Image (cartoon, grey):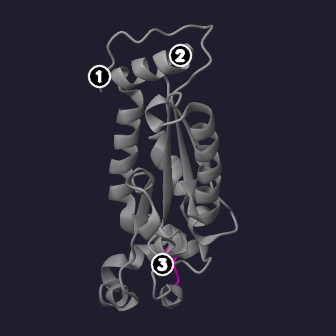
Amino acid sequence: INRSAIKVSTQGTLRPTLVIGMGETGWKTLEKVRSKLIRRYGEVSVWPVMRLLGIDVESASARLDTAGMSRELMDQLLLCKFRKPNQYFQGWDDLKHLSSWLDPNMLFQISSSGGTNGQRALGRLAFFENHRRILARLRSELEELLDSNRIHSQLAATGKLLRTEEPRVVVVGSMSGGVGSGMFIDLCYMIRR
């Protein structure tokens, strides 16, 4: 991370922030935040030291009409994939450690389009299956967020000061859906580490 000479002030109002939206509710929240930031600041490059990341399962691509999304918007979305249910069963001996929280019969609930059908255990399975990709993406987002060149340009564009270099991570999602409720605890644990 390029962290050269970033001026921090107690008078500052800005703090590097990564907002993560999990599942449909999280994505809808990110869309509202994004539209407010665009109305207020314009293009993403001049947003006030903020990044947005949506995490959902592959079936969301149909619901979110990813075919019609701009490249910029697609870059803010990480879609997690499942294996086919029969692939889990074929390798179940290697996955038995999951049985403390995943009933093997739950695997039949994975929708044909790769969705959780609102099942918390499947949201957690999606996290488990994609944790390396999620971790790599979190690291990448935080590196981008904390890049001093980016911070300098954003501070200049907003005319505001930075309060601290310590990033804040906000996680948004529904505790009644499959993705949000299934990923929340593991994602927060990953972020803290």
For label 3, the residue is: 99
For label 2, the residue is: 162
Residues shaded magenta: 99-103
The residue shown at (36%, 89%) is 89
Position of residue 59 relative to residue 27, above or below, is: below
Q: Which percent across, then down, holds residue 139?
A: 36, 42
Task: Say which amino acid is labelled 2.
Answer: Leu
The residue shown at (41%, 73%) is 97
The residue shown at (40%, 88%) is 85
Judged left or right of residue 129, residue 26 is: right
The answer to which quarter of the image holds residue 109 is: bottom right
Q: Which percent across, then down, holds residue 36?
A: 64, 41
Tags 2 and 1 in contact by the CB under 8 Å rule? no
- SS for tag 2? loop
Position of residue 75 relative to residue 125, above or below, is: above
Tags 3 and 1 in contact by the CB under 8 Å rule? no
Task: Say which amino acid is labelled 3.
Answer: Ser
Magenta highlight on residue 100: yes
- SS for tag 1? loop
Q: Is residue 144 visible?
A: yes
Observer-side mark, 3 or 1, equals 1
The residues tagged by marks 2 and 1 sit, at their Cα atoms, a distance apart of 16 Å
Magenta: main secondary structure: loop
Near mark 3 (Cα within 10 A), the count class, few <14, some 14-19 or many ≥20, is few
Mark carried by residue 2: 1
Q: Which percent across, then down, holds residue 94?
A: 31, 78
Observer-side mark, 3 or 2, equals 2
The residues tagged by marks 3 and 1 sit, at their Cα atoms, a distance apart of 43 Å
Task: Say which amino acid is labelled 1.
Answer: Asn
Near mark 2 (Cα within 10 A), the count class, few <14, some 14-19 or many ≥20, is many
Which circle's residue, 2 or 1, is located before the other in the chain? 1
Judged left or right of residue 156, residue 118 is: right
